[in-house]
């Protein structure tokens, strides 16, 4: 007969919305060991596995710290209670926790007060609901009965005959499958998983059941909402939220986001991030919530693993009205790990755009053509070893289903070309980075020459502001004396005068530096004053700086608004990315654009 040797969970801490899949080790009569599921519909050797999940509730209610969700709360901010800020955000595990988090926490109070002062009623944002005002006051020593009653969670079982009283505890049966996704009702409670071998003929359990208990379920942490700020200085009517669109019929929004591939999210690289928050089961749900919450018309993602695209992002975003396009990095012999291919994914809302054409740029193929034409045969192997890095770009031409052209151009098609790329990461290959960017821009020039079409160039360029790739994008040329040009062992960048393009590209976020008005001072403090680019879009313990950009054609598009930038107040004290709140080591960039009316020819 079958016997269960062991059950365990990859992560000790269950989080609301993140699927739990226990690891079940089963021994067969021939002594072989398997881990595959054995459902009743497909018994093995005359047996199958039966699963049950329980929520264990006791008389003692537990409040969870909003900053350290694996810790029990001992303090409550009375200002949050008075302001009617979500109760879960008011709890802290210690006075030091509350003090350290105050710079971040006070933003909740300020926005709650602002919502009342400006609107006189409730205001919705992406991750929270605020409709009052208050100050930071802490309440000491929460007891079980003082915790908010909402933390007791619902007592309605999902399955019949699911309530069992055992030793002062109540077990609610909540699942009958191997996997289980914790809900808000589970917050603060321990979950129990039970697995037993069942005879397929008699339907009776055989032997003892194997069980495990989780730690207490914690809510999924959520960051302070990021507002969409109009760069014209005119106050936007409301904030970006999940319930209503902010863009008018003649504008559209574009999101660019490196989501951090799971294959790169190693515990040794991001040891400062709790292991449960670094797990893909958690990060994928948190990333999805964030991406969907922005409600962008066009979404450009980088570092999307091919299996994650096919099995998760494409089907999940399809539910929210997005059509998906994908380009995987090319897998050549020079690729370091063929098992972790990632790539670029571009999504667009079907109700706002239709797909016209797709171009795929493989820098490996361009490298082979370049070496055939310019590199002596004796150096070809060395040249290919330097140039072939498997990076790609995905270019999509879309047609808008809206128009702001007016009666002068009735029926005129409004096209937009969106490039999504991830440039090579190796910092010592400055020549390769610049060559990849130049190759992409030359391809876009050909598209622009064939049609009157606005251009958007998005992605992770792994190049800081002021670098040669950034200069080429932003200024259309590279200074022949630029220090980056000193690294050119293959001679592919000479002469420097060829490093140009004719696309009128401007960085969207530089609009914060050009915007006038007192309201932009905070955003300008988050810019590099030399380049007007964000101080950072990538923030780890080892690096903080800007690698991500959204460039646009300034002759045919104008920037209407931008998603606000983060600073040390937006990231909790002593925190790098990824974190429980932000599930990538990059931050998302989002810009709202308007097409300029065409002049009649």
Image (spheres, helix red, strand yellow):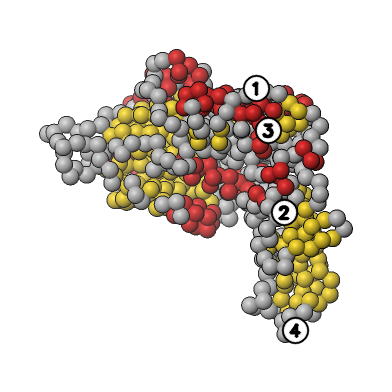
| Residue denoted by label 3 | 90
Q: Is residue 200 above or below residue 343?
A: below
Callout 2: helix, strand or loop?
loop
Choose between 344 and 57: the one closer to the eye.
57
* Residue 210 placement, left or right of 518: right
- Residue at 70 percent across and 29 percent down: it is 77
Answer with the quarter of the image where residue 267 lies: top right
Give the mark nearest the N terminus, 1 or 3. Answer: 3
Confirm or deny contact between disc 2 and disc 1 (CB under 8 A): no
Q: Nearer the viewer, mark 2 or mark 1?
A: 1
Answer with the quarter of the image where residue 94 lies: top right
> CA–CA distance between discs 3 and 4?
52 Å
| Residue denoted by label 1 | 135
Give the mark nearest the N terminus, 2 or 1. Answer: 2
| Residue denoted by label 4 | 202
Q: Nearer the viewer, mark 4 or mark 2?
A: 4
> CA–CA distance between discs 1 and 3?
12 Å
The answer to whether residue 349 is visible is: yes
* Residue 56 placement, left or right of 370: right
Classify mark 3: residues with Cα within 10 Å, few (<14), some (14-19) or many (20+). Answer: many
Choose between 237 and 499: the one closer to the eye.
237
The answer to whether residue 484 is visible is: no
In the orientation shown, which residue stands out farthest toward the right?
Answer: 167
Q: Nearer the viewer, mark 2 or mark 3?
A: 3
Give the mark nearest the N terminus, 4 or 2. Answer: 2
Across and down, in percent, residue 518 comes to: 45, 14
| Residue denoted by label 2 | 10
> CA–CA distance between discs 1 and 4?
64 Å
């Amino acid at each position: 007969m079958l016997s269960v040797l062991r059950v365990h969970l990859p992560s000790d801490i269950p989080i609301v919305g993140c699927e739990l899949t226990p690891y079940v080790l089963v021994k067969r009569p021939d002594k072989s060991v398997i881990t595959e599921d054995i459902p009743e519909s497909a018994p093995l050797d005359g047996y199958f596995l039966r699963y049950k999940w329980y929520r264990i509730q006791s008389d003692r209610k537990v409040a969870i710290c909003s900053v350290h969700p694996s810790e029990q709360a001992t303090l409550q901010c009375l200002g949050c209670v008075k302001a009617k800020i979500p109760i879960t955000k008011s709890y802290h595990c210690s006075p030091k926790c509350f003090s350290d988090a105050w710079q971040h926490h006070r933003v909740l109070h300020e926005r709650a007060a602002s919502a009342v002062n400006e609107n006189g009623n409730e205001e919705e944002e992406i991750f929270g609901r605020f409709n009052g005002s208050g100050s930071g006051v802490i309440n000491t020593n929460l007891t079980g009965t003082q915790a908010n009653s909402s933390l007791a969670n619902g007592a309605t079982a999902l399955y019949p005959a699911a309530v069992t009283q055992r030793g002062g505890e109540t077990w609610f049966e909540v699942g009958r499958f191997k996997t289980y996704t914790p809900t808000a009702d589970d917050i603060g409670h321990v979950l129990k998983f039970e697995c037993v071998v069942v005879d397929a003929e008699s339907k009776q359990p055989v032997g003892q059941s194997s069980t495990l208990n989780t730690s207490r379920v914690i809510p999924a942490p959520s960051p302070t909402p990021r507002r969409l700020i109009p760069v014209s200085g005119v106050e936007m009517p409301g904030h970006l939220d999940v319930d209503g669109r902010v863009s008018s019929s003649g504008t559209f929004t574009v999101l660019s986001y490196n989501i951090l591939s799971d294959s790169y999210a190693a515990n040794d690289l991001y040891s400062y991030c709790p292991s449960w928050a670094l797990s893909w089961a958690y990060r994928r749900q948190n990333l999805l919530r964030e991406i969907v919450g922005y409600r962008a018309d066009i979404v450009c993602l980088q570092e999307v693993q091919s299996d994650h695209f096919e099995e998760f992002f494409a089907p999940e975003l399809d539910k929210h009205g997005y059509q998906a396009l994908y380009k995987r990095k090319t897998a050549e012999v020079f690729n370091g790990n063929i098992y972790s291919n990632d790539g670029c994914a571009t999504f667009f809302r079907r109700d706002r755009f239709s797909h016209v054409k797709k171009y795929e740029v493989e820098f490996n193929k361009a490298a082979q053509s370049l070496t055939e034409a310019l590199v002596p045969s004796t150096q070809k192997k060395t040249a290919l070893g330097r140039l072939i890095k498997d990076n790609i770009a995905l270019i999509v031409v879309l047609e808008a289903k809206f128009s702001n052209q007016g009666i002068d151009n009735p029926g005129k098609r409004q096209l937009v070309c969106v490039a999504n790329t991830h440039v090579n990461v190796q910092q010592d290959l400055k020549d390769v980075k610049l060559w990849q960017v130049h190759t992409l821009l030359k391809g876009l020039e050909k598209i622009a020459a064939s049609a009157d079409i606005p251009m958007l160039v998005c992605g992770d360029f792994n190049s800081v502001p002021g670098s040669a790739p950034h200069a080429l994008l932003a200024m259309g040329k590279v200074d022949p004396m630029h220090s980056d040009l000193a690294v050119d062992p293959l001679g592919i960048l000479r002469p420097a005068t060829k490093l140009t393009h004719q696309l009128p590209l401007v960085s969207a976020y530089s609009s914060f530096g050009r915007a006038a008005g007192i309201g932009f001072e905070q955003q300008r403090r988050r810019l590099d004053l030399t380049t007007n680019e964000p101080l950072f879009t990538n923030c780890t313990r080892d690096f903080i700086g800007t690698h991500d950009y959204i460039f646009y054609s300034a002759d045919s598009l104008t920037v209407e608004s931008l998603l606000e930038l983060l600073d040390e107040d937006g990231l909790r004290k002593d925190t790098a990315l990824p974190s429980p709140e932000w599930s990538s080591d990059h931050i998302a960039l989002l810009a709202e654009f308007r097409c300029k009316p065409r002049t009649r020819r």
